[in-house]
Amino acid sequence: MANDKGRRRRFGAIRKLPSGRYQARYPGPDGIMRPAPRTFETIADADDWLSEKRTEIRKGEWRDPDAGAVNFRAYADKWVEERELSVLTRDLYRRLLDRSILPTFGDDDLDEITAPLVRSWRTEQLRTGSKVVTAKAYRLLKAVMETAVDDDLIRRNPCRIKGAGAEKAAERPTATVAQVDALAEHVGMRWRLMVYLGAYGPMRPEELAGLRRRDVDLDAMKITVRLAEPERTNGLRAPGDTKSDAGTRTVHLPGFLRREVRWHLESFAESAPDGLLFVGERGAPFRRSTFGRKWRAARTAVGLPDGFRFYDLRHTGHTLSTRSGATLKDTMVRAGQSSEKAAMIYQHSEEERQREVAAMLDRSVRKARRPKKRKKNDQASGTDLARGD
């Protein structure tokens, strides 16, 4: 077999060290001689290890042992930069990296991040932070490490915790028709239409921010959602495409909103065709922070829970539409919802059907308002403006 003086073998070489242990070396596919990461007690042990390496090379399973010696921070930064991400998604990934992932793994090499270390990190994240944020951070870490596997930098992804990336959000609250009317009343005249479109459009906040006068067809009672203008954490807007292809859509509005839309166009929307539909008191695009203060005050006045978000207004419209007979397909198209699975199952909902859904929603809201209007003798309020033509 191998001798102690380092004579070349048929594959690799073994030599005896002054300590009495044995060192094994082998030529990689690139011709570079590489030593084993450890020494062996016997020649037989060293020979077995060389046989394993030879088999890996023959099967194409060999990986350069130095490939994983890449700093995780540098690799993750490059990973984010190389992807075509929306501005908000890029901001989210940076926050997750900076706050949740890099403090633990930023100084490690890729091959130093092991499954036990990932489990310990996740346990600590759950103990000190949000379950939802932890799930998002875990998914990001897993995605980065999966790319490292594809790049042949590591052999196996260390993120192998079943279900760790799933977010189990609590069921969202749904406002009643009366509560939506009350919210519209409390946010003030400039913003009341925004509340109604959020509930009965139903449109996302970033979609409302991107609406222009030209997007509104008052005669046909429909609004075309063409783009979204989400606000970044630095206060700047990031105009771009809607959340998905399904987000670009025409929304048919229920008839009770006709006066609301007309009055808003006459009173608050910018006059140019490309002018913003919603602007702040000083004529500038509204800020999330400014509207947020009005929203929180209105939410408190109405008695809705602190966790009730503007986005939750969509549930009111969804609930009334489905109760009125709208199918899941109708609701998805109206709300601009899309997923890979849904795209294969659901066809596009026809415009005529969307008008029918808007009419059903109109009847549902008018019916829900009827007892309140009789009690208040039809006094001026959001319901007064919303009686129709």
Image (tube, grey):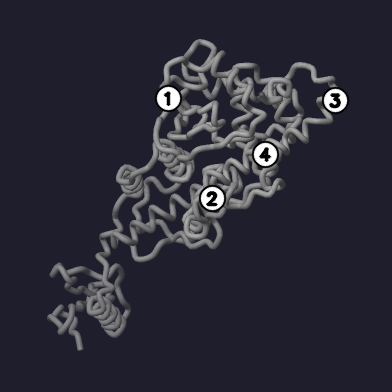
Task: Identify which amino acid the numbered label 4 is placed on.
Answer: Leu
Above or below, 41 relative to 242: below
Task: Identify which amino acid the numbered label 3 is placed on.
Answer: Arg
Determine the CA span between mark 4 and mark 2.
36 Å
- Residue 367 picture quarter: top right
Determine the CA span between mark 4 and mark 3.
21 Å
Crowd class of label 4 (few under 14; some 14 to 19; many from 20; radius 10 Å): many
Judged from this view, the residue extending furthest toward the right is: 375
Q: How far from the left and from the top, in percent, is residue 192?
A: 63, 22
- Disc 1 marks which residue? 236
- Disc 4 marks which residue? 361
- Disc 3 marks which residue? 374
Crowd class of label 3 (few under 14; some 14 to 19; many from 20; radius 10 Å): few
- Disc 2 marks which residue? 135
Q: How far from the left and from the top, in percent, is residue 85?
A: 37, 42
Tag 2 secondary structure: helix
Task: Identify which amino acid the numbered label 1 is placed on.
Answer: Leu
Crowd class of label 1 (few under 14; some 14 to 19; many from 20; radius 10 Å): few
Q: Considering only order in the chain, which callout, 2 or 4, is on the residue closer to the N terminus? A: 2
Q: Are marks 4 and 2 in contact (CB under 8 Å)?
A: no
